[in-house]
Image (cartoon, helix red, strand yellow):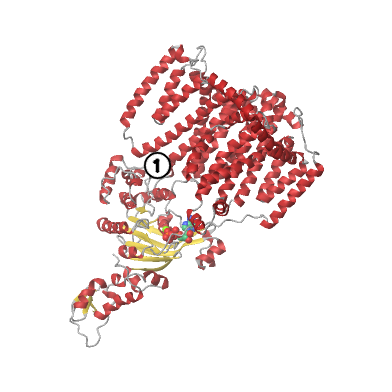
Amino acid sequence: MSVLDRPRVEEPVPEVGAPPRLKRGWAVGATIFVWLGGWALLRGTATLELGGAELTGFHQWLNGVRDDFDAARDTSFFFQYVIGGISTAIDTVVTFFQELLSQPAFPRPVPEIGWLGVVALLTWLAYALAAWRSALLVFVSLLLFGSLGYWTDSIDLLIVTAVAVAICVVIGLPTGIWMARSKRATAALTPVLDLMQTMPAFAYLAPLALFFGIGPASAVVTTLIYALPPLVRITAHGIRTVAPTTLEASRSLGTTDVQALRKVQLPMAKRTIIVGVNQCMMAALSMATIAALINGPGLGQPVAQALQSLDIGSAFVSGIAIVIMAIMLDRTTTAASQRAEKEARAGRAGGRRRWVVLGAGGAVALVLVYVSRTYLWAAEFPERPDLGTPLSDGVTQLTDWLVTTLENVTNSLKDLVTYALINPLESLLADTPWWLMGLVILAFAYLLGGWRPTAISAVCLLVILGTGLWNETMKTLTTTLVATLIVILSALVVGVWMGRNHRADTAIRPLLDALQTIPPFVYLVPALALFSTSRFTAIVAAVAYGVPIATKLIADGIRGVSPTSVEAARAAGTTAWQMISKVQLPMARAAVVLASNQGLLYVLSMVVIGGLVGGGGLGYLVVAGFSQAQLFGKGLAAGIAITALGIMLDRIAQYAAARYGRA
Amino acid sequence: MTATTISPVKTTESALSVRHLWKIFGTKADKIIGSPDADLSRQELQAKTGCVMAVKDVSFDVAPGEVFVVMGLSGSGKSTLVRLLTRLIEPTAGQVIMGGSEITAASESELRELRRHHVAMVFQHFGLLPHRKVIDNIAYGLEVRGEGKTERRQRAQEMVDLVGLEGYEESYPDQLSGGMQQRVGLARALAVDPDVLMFDEPFSALDPLIRRDMQNEVIRLHEEVGKTMVFITHDLSEALKLGDRILIMRDGEIVQIGTPDEVVAVPADDYVRDFVSEVPRSHVLTLRWVVREPRPGEPVDGPVMQAGVIVKDAARAVLEAEQPVRVYDGDRFLGVVDDEDILRVVVAEEDEQPEPEPQP
Ligand SMILES: Nc1ncnc2c1ncn2[C@@H]1O[C@H](COP(=O)(O)OP(=O)(O)OP(=O)(O)O)[C@@H](O)[C@H]1O
Ligand SMILES: [Mg+2]
């Protein structure tokens, strides 16, 4: 053939306003010099520090707003009918399922369906949606929930998660489809989704509590906000990436838009959409646990209580229950998507036996439901066998032993990081006068990303200033930066190893996958056990949370380096270290940048949650805002500051990534 | 469903006629036509305005039942051209008339009707629906135009038999080889019983042996169903083998339109000459292109042959004949051909380059 297909190359558009490289080096040096100089001379002045109980006018005003809202709840039309309507609807649904499955249904002392019936029904459902393996998994998990002593909380969490996911699907699918089909919708909704995803979960607890009060309704809405974006995005992506040639072929036969959607796009995107539902469900689960802080029902409650009373044993056991729930939901939805695929493939072949089993199983489940309504032993989960108490005691003993044995190690590690890294950096960030610090941040934003992130950062800094929590924000920034640094370093080491060594990859990857399914809340437990409450504890949890994603991204990047280049370099006599530093890392730069970016966002969201275990800073204020009425306004302001900080870091990282991530 | 039928106003004898068709990709593309910018080369235009001239002032006619081949190098605008014909891409300017109705003026629903009943297309990358069985892929066009299940199953089954896919009805596309997948694509297009079939490099993704099979398949189908075909390819041997006429494009413009032997014998310019230089001329040229006036005194009582015979096929007879062969176009005497005339065609191409193997 005389011709090869010519690829269509898009020329990268050079970023306007980017200073040339050499000058940039000088500018960075100069900025750091000014910063250090200013810190040395003016340290401790104009730091805008605020005492624990001190409130600014803004905080008091927010308290007033809360009081007004509370007062308006019964009088204003908006509150009574719009907010009240939503909240009543959600509460009703949640309560309905609770009385059906988990909580006493008045006048009965037990739920309508006892534990035996619930186990039977959910096992049957797992078999219907996925396969017998999932059914077995669900069966065992449910029994574990009960014998760990958290039957009611587990089913409550399941209900909140399921209700939130159901609402997500109802809203998210059409929105995703709409976005896939309309450029304008994409342009309008993308920033909203971005905001929903960059806002650390902690930040919108308070505003939602303001509107919906505390309880199931605001827990579900919070969960919804957090879990909706992945579903919308993945749905839109799935539909958009349906092969254009297939779509064109279908158009060439005269399909209408609706036909194309129903017969081509949706079926071809089905698997991706189920992946979206899976992501949505995992996000919902992790948020539903955090929502315990605003009185959301479920397993988050015992974890939060145990964390606050430093009861490691109980925190561990309830944390384990959450992990089991996560694994159960993840595996079952994954299996369901595989089943959907297989069904589309093989038609209904081999279905006869399945139908028989389904029918028989359904009948058995119904009988057990009846039994569980009739006999008390089948209605209330038996107290024995009790796995929870011995496990909790064992863990407490083990931790005590560990802490005393490892005290030297953990303490020296903690002190090393605290004195060598956290303290100096915190002093630099928080003791520098606010105006100088602000200018330094803007200078870095400009040098890293150009004008646009600088402008956004300026706005964010003004907002932070306005919240009156500048000093606390700088402390949170310190913890975030330290944790991010550790995340990137560990991810580089492990990621490069995995990328270069197939065996390492096969060994480590499942572990990382497992770590990623664990809701962030649970990470606090082991960190707390080892390091008691301190800023370092929050950092440890944040690192543990950020490392898996960053490591996987880097490993994939290294693996993706073209084998031809590696081979050519090897042929030229490159050593292993040269290969890493001169070929693989530079060629995987985009992945490294993306990994840092993601690592940063993960860390930030976790650092804030670390407020629960002595992380201090803004996260602590958010938590305090829920527990003490007069600190509500301050907590809300902290949420705003977190959001501003998150947006600022995200934007700087994004623009820097766009600039430096280009190979 | 809008049951708009496009009234077949007889404006022309052609199955398809294309008048001054333009396609320029880019913003404000319509401003360029008629302005001096339109005369710039593609590169200059792109540098100046950022627009890509994909198809430039193209006009041609295709007769009913004809196989019309469009060929050119990658990027010459072939795919764009064939998509303009059914407005899978909207033309910037110009007219397309198919079966007497003006496609370029059709409304959205008329266009849909047209695509459902009158034209069908076969794509380079097949464009099959991976989640449907072969039989349902073939029936897809019938399904979207609202035919009942039994009718479309029956029709699809006929198509399965026609393209030789018996036994694979219940398979899924990814269980088939590339050649078989393209047979599905072909069957899907044939199922709607269109007046015109379009092919966009349908066999480029297939390996050479399968490609030859598929080309023969198209020739057979053309003999059986006699559809008008517009066939895009960048493979000259394919063009020569299938085409009644060939349109050669470069940078969106027509360089030459002609029958295969015209294109090989009198290339319009160096671009075309380059293209056809590798073709074994004796396999394409007919006696018409080598015939000459009898020289004075030359005997004119040798064997008789028709002008349409390909040189390669005539060679043996001419070389064995004692006398120069007399060439007739029907009853009309055109002239004579002798050993030397034949050898000139055969030897000349051996001088240019050694022929690796005879082309099909
Ligand atoms: N959607 C588009 N937007 C901008 N330019 C396009 C678009 N589609 C095609 N082009 C350009 O139009 C020109 C013609 O493209 P076309 O795909 O028609 O070529 P082709 O002859 O089919 O090539 P090939 O043999 O590679 O398929 C090319 O320069 C191409 O880059
Ligand atoms: Mg093409």
Mark 1, residues whose alpha carbon is within 10 Å: few (<14), some, or many (≥20)?
some
Question: Does B299 appear above or below B262?
Answer: below
Task: Tell me which image quadrant ligand 2 sits in.
Answer: bottom left
Mark 1 belongs to chain = A
**Left or right placement of residue A635 versus residue A142 in this view:** right
Measured as percent of width and height from the top left, residue B305 is found at 21, 74
Quarter of the figure with residue A339: top left
Question: Does A80 appear above or below B263?
Answer: above
User: Is residue A200 in sight in this rendering?
Assistant: no
Residue beneath disc 1: A263
Task: Specify the amino acid type for callout 1.
Answer: Lys
Question: Does A196 appear above or below A400?
Answer: below
Quarter of the figure with residue A208: top right
- In the picture, which quadrant includes the C terminus of chain B? bottom left
Q: Secondary structure at mark 1?
A: helix
Measured as percent of width and height from the top left, residue B79 is found at 42, 58
**Left or right placement of residue A275 versus residue A617 in this view:** left
Residue at far bottom of view: B297
Question: Does B39 appear above or below A308?
Answer: below
User: Is residue A435 in sight in this rendering?
Assistant: yes
Q: Is mark 1 within 8 Å of ligand 1?
A: no
- Tell me the residue at 37%/61% (across/down): B233
- Tell me the residue at 50%/46% (across/down): A501
